[in-house]
Image (spheres, rainbow, N blue to C red):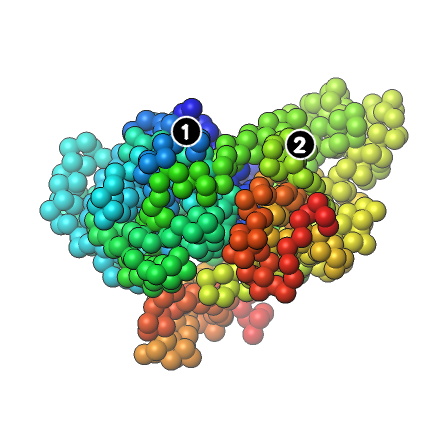
């Protein structure tokens, strides 16, 4: 039996899943200390399902804590960025184009040092050990405990970042260090930005993990717990403290994975309609399609792997203008007091849904003075915006199944142009927590092979084997591991046909917890 | 007139428009220029007509793979060295900096080096837009050679190329660029003030700024595209600017070949025009537009794809199925449509078997 928990900014959701069935689900307000909300949610589902805590074999938590902390500039560590690049890339130092309030919040400081690589893996210049030792002692003097290290072309060759980290650790073994190669792709500024973001969350991540642990211990749950990552796979609690940034968009990922699991549809589009926005994502083989462009988080440009999500300004709380235009402004959290059907004075998309008969809540009589033409226009506005959004998220013409989730999904009727089918799965309100509960474990390999010396088939086979063994080490059960992604990027201009090969494998978590689920599979 | 730090964003957006799909993302270039403006002050922009005839003018640009530029960022020292290497070779100190093209990073880097050197930048360039190769500039059209040309990298290394003509300079430079780490700062087409007056395309820097500003002002009134077209149509040289078509991308086919993105995109009309298809053919830059098979605009006239809602210019590599966009076309100044110029960048120079016809006659 698995327990999936989604800790959002407003609600903490929990679901219990056993034998591929949802046993119980709940929504509780998120508490200030986080732990309180988690405990309340767990107690509720356990009671509803009539189980004892010892039956829970694994706990999977999805959270937006770290994203929120970064966006709100709260609880961030002071960070120093060290870039290995000299004499190149001097004109644009780390923290270029960062918002000033954020620079202040993390007391931004940077050091440029010798090192880095050319596109072909040759050194720009050798690492300057003496300079790094000076930096290390300066960090100590300034009482800085969190560091991001980047180097030019680290995705091609990462050795210098690793060596620099070793040198710094010698001076301060407790230093929290993030290496850019672990986080981002080609694009020095964006990758470095992501590494700095991660470094700024180091202490907060430790605290959050500790409070999760505390909540579970308080209930006497001794099962291992995991956090879900952007790519829909699990990360062990200890790892989270090192890579909090990898949870940044686990929210939309979990919602899409949950929608896929609940509906049984593995390829299609997911439309998650909330209070303020509708988030549209694409599912490929049960996993969200990744974004290929830079993503702005809290005013900072980054390029780490995130699901490709299109946010439209249409939600249950969207304002309806006199023209019938719905959104993008919204009453947001105040829906339950501001909307007409709830006694307020603002005409919202939810009122339109009630007036049209698509939804039944609140006091419909309060809408009797609204002109039917306006309602009609508003419905058309909602329909057109969502249809356009759905079309934009496709990669080619043709119809795809659409899975509707989120509390605002009542806004939409049963027809959507471009949809072969509209599915509203059960438990759609807690799709996030379901997505967390069903998360798998993954292993990834990212390596440059010379196809001239190692033939392509041999190289791919080697990368696959390494990815599988890394998924196994991460805790996947051997027979469930499958390769889900192979990417080959030829490195231009290279004489020996060098190709960067990235392979990703995932499998079900191998422990007592999911043995029931696996038995069912076999 | 000074170019202010806050002008960089509109210039970059205007250059992205004039880049007609090519030129790449100016983001890194803009940040480099901002950083150098802050450090060295804002540069002066002068008209070509203000130059002394015997003034020494140098081009500043970067050349090479965009993927290298986003890792090993070309900055002030490299750009500066490329110019000083050429100064040393010719024995003439630079009096002003001239941009080579309006598109991508190369619209920004000349401003950065002008700030660093305390030199004026000339309100003109050699393309009035973006083209993929070094010899596709008005200077070459009118007999100025790209050689001697310099190349510089972050190690303080520089190379001088002295090839027999501009095309050969391009060929030699492309080979040497690999040894320079895949990208390098360059300077080329060293020329006198008199030559600049004869050969450069005037007013393109302020044009880029005007385009960027018309878009951002238009966004405030919710009509960026109307504002942009009105602005262009009100200028001396781009008076035939027009909205060709609005629709959504129905399909794209492209392939990468020898460093170029080649292909075409099909845009289906909306509403009563939903039976019409506009096809844009590109080789990095948008070259040809056909409406239901009929030619309606061609290179060197500008064919630009912008987002229907925001007016934001869309580069060739960012085109995606389902995008809503508007196709805007504009004529180019007469200097770019002369017979000599069309030999270098008319439809035949890109492999088409027809001659140039101006948009106002199509």
Pick whichever, A6 or A373, lies toward us. A373
Residue A117 horizontal/vertical position (percent): 27, 56
> Tag 2, which chain?
B
Question: Is residue B32 in view from this perspective?
Answer: no
Task: Using the rendered view, name the quadrant where residue A438 is placed.
Answer: bottom right
Q: Image point 70% across, 45% down: which residue?
A: B360
Discs 2, 1 touching: Cβ within 8 Å:
no
User: Dot 2: what SS?
Assistant: helix
Drawn side of residue B196 relative to residue A518, left or right: left
User: Dot 1: what SS?
Assistant: helix
Does label 1 lie on the same chain as label 2? yes
In the rendered image, which residue does mark 1 sit on? B50
Where A339 falls versus A302 (above or below)?
above
Residue A245 horizontal/vertical position (percent): 41, 45
Residue B19 horizontal/vertical position (percent): 53, 46
In the rendered image, which residue does mark 2 sit on? B230
> Tag 1, which chain?
B
* Label 2 or label 1, whichever comes before in sequence order: 1
Q: Image point 58% across, 69% down: which residue?
A: A520
Q: Image point 25% across, 44% down: which residue?
A: B87
Drawn side of residue A372 relative to residue A419, left or right: right
Cα distance, mark 2 to mark 1? Answer: 29 Å
Pick whichever, A453 or A355, lies toward us. A453
């Amino acid at each position: 039996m698995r327990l999936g928990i989604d800790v959002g900014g407003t609600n903490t959701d929990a679901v219990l899943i056993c034998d591929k069935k949802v046993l119980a689900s709940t929504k509780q307000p998120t508490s200030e200390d986080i732990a309180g909300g988690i405990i309340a949610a767990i107690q509720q589902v356990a009671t509803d399902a009539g189980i004892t805590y010892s039956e829970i074999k694994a706990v999977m938590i999805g959270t937006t804590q770290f994203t929120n902390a970064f966006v709100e500039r709260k609880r961030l560590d002071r960070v120093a960025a060290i870039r290995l690049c000299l004499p190149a890339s001097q004109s644009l130092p780390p923290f270029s184009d960062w918002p000033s309030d954020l620079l202040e919040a993390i007391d931004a400081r940077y050091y440029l040092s010798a090192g880095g690589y050319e596109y072909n893996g040759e050194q720009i210049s050798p690492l300057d050990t003496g300079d790094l030792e000076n930096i290390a002692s300066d960090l100590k003097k300034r009482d800085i405990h969190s560091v991001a290290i980047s180097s030019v072309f680290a995705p091609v060759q990462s050795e210098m970042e690793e060596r620099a980290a070793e040198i710094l650790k010698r001076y301060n073994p407790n230093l929290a260090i993030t290496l850019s190669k672990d986080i981002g792709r080609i694009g020095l500024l964006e990758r470095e930005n992501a590494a700095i973001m991660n470094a700024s969350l180091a202490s907060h991540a430790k605290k959050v993990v500790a409070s999760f642990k505390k909540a579970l211990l308080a209930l006497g749950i001794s099962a291992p717990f995991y956090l879900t990552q952007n790519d829909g796979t699990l990360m062990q609690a200890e790892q989270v403290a090192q890579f909090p940034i990898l949870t940044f968009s686990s929210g939309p990922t979990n919602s899409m994975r949950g929608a896929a699991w609940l509906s049984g549809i593995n390829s299609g589009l997911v439309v998650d309609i909330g209070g303020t926005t509708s988030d549209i994502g694409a599912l490929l083989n049960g996993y969200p399609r990744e974004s290929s462009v830079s993503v702005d988080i809290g005013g900072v440009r980054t390029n780490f792997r995130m699901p490709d999500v299109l946010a439209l300004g249409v939600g249950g709380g969207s304002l309806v203008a006199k023209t019938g235009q719905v959104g993008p402004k919204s009453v947001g959290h105040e829906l339950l007091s501001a909307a007409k059907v709830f006694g307020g004075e603002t005409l919202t998309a939810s009122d339109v849904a009630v007036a049209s008969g698509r939804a039944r809540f609140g006091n419909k009589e309060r809408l009797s003075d609204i002109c039917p033409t306006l309602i009609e226009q508003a419905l058309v506005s909602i329909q057109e915006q969502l249809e356009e959004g759905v079309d934009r998220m496709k990669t080619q013409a043709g119809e795809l199944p659409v899975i509707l989730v989120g509390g605002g999904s009542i806004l939409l009727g049963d027809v959507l142009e471009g949809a072969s089918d509209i599915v509203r799965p059960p438990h759609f309100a807690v799709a996030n927590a379901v997505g967390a509960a069903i998360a798998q474990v993954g292993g990834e390999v990212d390596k440059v092979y010379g196809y001239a010396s190692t033939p392509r088939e041999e190289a791919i086979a080697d990368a696959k084997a390494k990815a599988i063994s890394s998924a196994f080490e991460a805790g996947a059960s051997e027979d469930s591991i499958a390769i889900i992604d192979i990417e080959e990027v030829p490195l231009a201009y290279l004489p020996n046909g060098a190709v960067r090969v990235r392979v990703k494998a995932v499998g079900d978590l191998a422990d007592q917890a999911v043995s029931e689920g696996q038995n069912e599979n076999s | 007139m000074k170019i202010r730090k806050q002008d960089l964003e509109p210039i970059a957006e205007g250059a992205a428009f004039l880049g007609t799909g090519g030129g790449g993302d100016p983001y890194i270039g803009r940040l480099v220029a901002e950083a150098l403006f802050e450090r060295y002050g804002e540069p002066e922009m002068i008209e070509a007509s203000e130059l002394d005839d015997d003034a020494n003018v140098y081009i500043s640009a970067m050349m090479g793979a965009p993927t290298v530029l986003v890792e090993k960022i070309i900055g002030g020292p490299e750009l500066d060295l490329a110019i000083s290497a050429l100064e040393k070779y010719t024995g003439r100190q630079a009096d002003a900096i001239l941009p080579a093209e309006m598109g991508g990073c190369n619209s920004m880097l000349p401003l950065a080096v002008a700030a660093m050197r305390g030199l004026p930048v000339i309100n003109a360039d050699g393309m009035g837009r973006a083209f993929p190769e070094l010899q596709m500039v008005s200077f070459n059209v009118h007999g100025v050679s790209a050689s001697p040309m310099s190349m510089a990298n972050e190690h303080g290394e520089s190379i001088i190329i002295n090839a027999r003509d501009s095309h050969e300079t391009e060929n030699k430079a492309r080979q040497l660029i690999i040894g320079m780490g895949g990208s390098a700062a360059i300077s080329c087409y060293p020329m006198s003030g008199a030559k600049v007056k004869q050969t450069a395309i005037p007013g393109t820097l302020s044009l880029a700024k005007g385009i960027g500003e018309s878009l951002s002002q238009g966004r405030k009134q919710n009509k960026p595209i109307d504002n942009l077209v009105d602005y262009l149509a009100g200028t001396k040289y781009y008076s035939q600017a027009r909205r060709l078509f609005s629709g959504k991308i129905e399909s794209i086919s492209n392939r990468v070949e020898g460093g170029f993105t080649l292909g075409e995109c099909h845009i289906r009309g909306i509403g009563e025009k939903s039976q019409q298809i506009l096809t844009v053919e590109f080789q990095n830059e948008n070259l040809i537009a056909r409406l239901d098979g009929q030619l309606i605009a061609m290179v060197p006239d500008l064919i630009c794809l912008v987002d229907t809602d925001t007016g934001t210019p869309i580069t060739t590599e960012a085109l995606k199925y389902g995008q809503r966009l508007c196709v805007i076309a504009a004529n180019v100044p007469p200097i770019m449509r002369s017979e000599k110029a069309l030999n270098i960048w008319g439809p035949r120079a890109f492999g088409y078997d027809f001659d140039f016809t101006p948009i106002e006659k199509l």
